[in-house]
Image (cartoon, coloured by chain):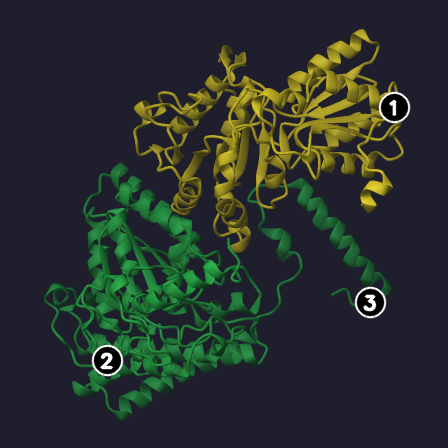
Amino acid sequence: MTAEQMTLARGLNAGLRRALTDDEKVVLLGEDIGALGGVFRVTDGLQREFGPRRVMDTPLAESGILGTAIGLAYRGYRPVVEIQFDGFVYVAFDQIVSQVAKMRARTGGAVSMPLTIRIPVAGGIGAAEHHSESPEAYFVHTAGLRVVSVSNPQDAATVLRQAIASDDPVVFFEPKRLYHVKGPVELEDLDAARPMGAAHVVRPGRDVTVATWGSHVSTAIDAAEAMADDGASVEVIDLRSLSPWDSDTVVASVRRTGRLVVVQEGPRQAGVGAEICATVTERCFEHLQAPPVRVTGHDVPYPPAKLEGHHVPDLDRVCFGIDQALGRVPLDVPTARPEEVAA
Amino acid sequence: MPSTTDPRTRQDLSRAGESASSADSAHGGARDRAVPDRAVPDRPASNGRPARAGAPRGEGHDDATVRLLDADGVRRPEAAYDRWVEDVDDAALLRLYEDLAVVRRIDTEATALQRQGQLALWPPLLGQEAAQIGSARALRDDDFVFSSYREHAVAHARGVAPVDLLRVWRGAVGSGWNPHEARMAPMQVIIGAQSLQAVGYGVGILADAEREGRTGDTEVAVTYFGDGATSQGDVSEAFTFASTWSAPVVFFCQNNQWAISEPVSLQSKVPLVERARGFGMPGVRVDGNDVLAVLAVTREALHRARTGGGPTLIEAVTYRRGPHTTADDPTRYRTSAEIEHWEARDPVARVAAHLRGRGVLDDDVEARVQESADAVAAELRAGISQVEDPSWEAIFADVYAEPHHELAAERDAYARYLDGFAATGEDAR
């Protein structure tokens, strides 16, 4: 099969169509996913093709969507749920964290939860409040879930199919900024494709490792280009999977480069980047030539659209992070002064 | 939320307290004994009389409460429901009585085992036997149950061995049974969460039936929850999803009057069964201490679900006579008079009185039933002490269905840590 140019949204659509075709137990649930095809058109045409029993418009209740998906999984189905926007997933938190994630352990392996939870994620699109969240850390922190985020149309199609085929529940983040970005997509043989949990070195380099995921992979590649003009060779790793995350690939890279920058859009504190920095420090301590650097969103509620440029890591901030890792500019770790802490 | 020291709040609370009496009669509560049985009309909650402090009053059953056996065991005709239990002869009723006796005995034994340190905790079902047995015995083997944590009698009726009922409460496992074998999900601790899961299962039944070209006689998903759960968003969402999707679901609410220390009047100003109307599904209120009536209304609801009629809400009015769990102290929030009121409406004694009146039950038969119940309890006691603590590896075993190298590495590191104790001759754990 030859690759076809399509947007990331169409890549997801193609992946869903293939999954629905391959396995009659795959069902889709979500708000506005039927006639409308989803607010981002990811499910465009699927209800017409597969019918309302397999592509189900749900009442407007995210906990309800997850709870019913669990019941469908009990019945032998493989539900793919769409959460319309990242900020809407919190009302489904109990059904995901207390129910989906724990069901297999609770039942001693008797009941699996092969759910895929699709969530449009992150900002940078000038959206309204609660439409630009980066909630990945909550789910990475939850045992029993797998968490992935895609950065290109090919992964959108392939990783989504892998997530649906997985007998474990997978939280699948779709960066909204990338929905309309085009790239080649081939409906690959899943057995031959890169495993869902594997990171991908998208650009090799010698001097510093940048690890990121989702929409910031392209930012990191742009930064690597810019830094090349500045005499630095930057390796960019698309983590692809956040839980589990492919620490071997990152560790191998940092052992070569001796320097690490992690880019994440979510808040800094206890973010996925913190976990990566901690593990790399543990496993690469004697190879590190500088402290790991985090380029992150601030520890603030996601700001109004006119201010999101100050929150979302951009090319300049990633380059600044790389410069810090290289020792070209002083490392500027946010640190409160003792007198402020005392106050 | 205003604090209780806010005078406006006190005022509001005092007003709420006044109407709580009407809410009590609305909920078949214990505080309305001055209102004669059946004397409360279709009880608009705002019309209730103030409660007399400390004076329990009538059960407040209105005409809409289905009851086939009076509290003294007299069978009373109920045209709409008699046909659902036409086949229940004396022998069948005797078996139901035996069920009630056995689950009560299991419950008593479990409470004792908790007091003796064999269990970490136990939520007694005392008083709710008929609500659970009457409904669970209406189910087919291929139906599927999503319950809360007090449905020991339901699990018993699904064939779960008594010792398996207790293993969770001993802290040995996450589920005492294989859900696919028992056709009952593990007990749910998060209040109301299971109701949605039942609806999803019901949607799966519909999808299967459509794909297989079956109509008219599907399986049903049945979910059990309490009066407290009706305040949870998940339960309202479950009502909505089941109703608009016409899912084959039975919502079985045991209104046992108390959510730990909170009376049902704090959960709802109207009878819980009235919620059904707003969600567009039939609701029926039944005397939950009448095993025959519970069987009848559940059969009707199951039939409706099997034949494409969608969900039903059953409110079984009953009473939790024991503590919420063995860690609870109900003397802090309710009176002994209230307990006595409900003891007089005991679900086991009621059917026993009926069977004695029919000449089916006598002292000999009762002794035999008690003997077999005691045997179950003895077997349970012997079995629970044989339940071994699981090995530490169990905590890593079933977190994921597919290989997870990072977790495996964590497990291995912990194994090396434990091995360190073995090397020094210390007891690892």
| Residue ranking furthest to the front | B7
Secondary structure state at the residue bearing disc 2: loop
Check contact, mark 2 vs mark 3: CB within 8 A.
no
Q: Are marks 3 and 1 on the same chain?
A: no
Q: Are marks 2 and 3 on the same chain?
A: yes
Callout 2, which amino acid? Ala
* Disc 3 target residue: B426
**Which chain is disc 2 placed on?**
B
- Chain that appears yellow: A
Callout 3, which amino acid? Glu
Q: Toward the viewer: B244 or B136?
A: B244
Callout 1, which amino acid? Pro
* Disc 2 target residue: B71
**Which chain is disc 1 placed on?**
A
- Chain that appears green: B
* Disc 1 target residue: A330
- The percent coordinates of residue B93 (x first, y second) are 22, 76
- The percent coordinates of residue A88 (x first, y second) are 49, 36
In this rendering, which labeled residue sits more in front, label 2 or label 3? Answer: 2
Circle 3 packing at 10 Å, graded few (<14), some (14-19), many (20+), is few
Q: Is residue A189 visible?
A: no
